[in-house]
Image (cartoon, helix red, strand yellow):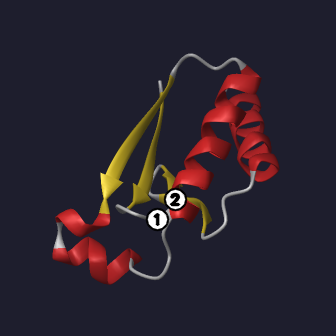
Amino acid sequence: MLEMVYYTRDNCQLCNEGLEQVRVAINELRYSDVRLTMVDIDSEEGLQEKYMIRVPVLEHDNKVVQEGIIDFAQVYDYLKDYRGNSR
């Protein structure tokens, strides 16, 4: 299982658009074993401080894959490379 975390917040159009890019990349690669956990940064003060001006943020293994503007091609390449290197 490839587990990723997507930091977002309510009423964030950039977050909504980025989430769509992530989902399209996962679907395009036909990966059925990716778990995407959504985390609202407004749910904890510490998260607000850390991610306030950075959302959306996509992380894997506690490393930032991409933040701000989430790009389909970069997410696609990351997932493809990760899968290729983890086999």
Q: Are marks 2 and 1 in contact (CB under 8 Å)?
A: yes
Instruction: Indicate the secondary structure of the residue bearing disc 1.
Output: loop
Image disc number at residue 15: 2
> Callout 2: few (<14), some (14-19), or many (20+) C-alpha neighbours within 10 Å?
many
Q: Amino acid at mark 2?
A: Cys
Indicate left or right for 58 with 17 as reference. left
Counting from the top left corner in percent of width and height, residue 42 is at: 24, 68
Counting from the top left corner in percent of width and height, residue 31 is at: 64, 20
Q: Is residue 20 above or below residue 18?
A: above
Task: Determine which residue is flagged by label 1.
Answer: 12
Q: Residue at x 77, y 52 (%)?
A: 74
Q: Is residue 22 above or below residue 74?
A: above
Instruction: Indicate the secondary structure of the residue bearing disc 2.
Output: helix
Q: Residue at x 52, y 59 (%)?
A: 15
Quadrant containing the C terminus is top right
Q: Residue at x 61, y 53 (%)?
A: 17
Frontmost residue, 60 versus 86? 60
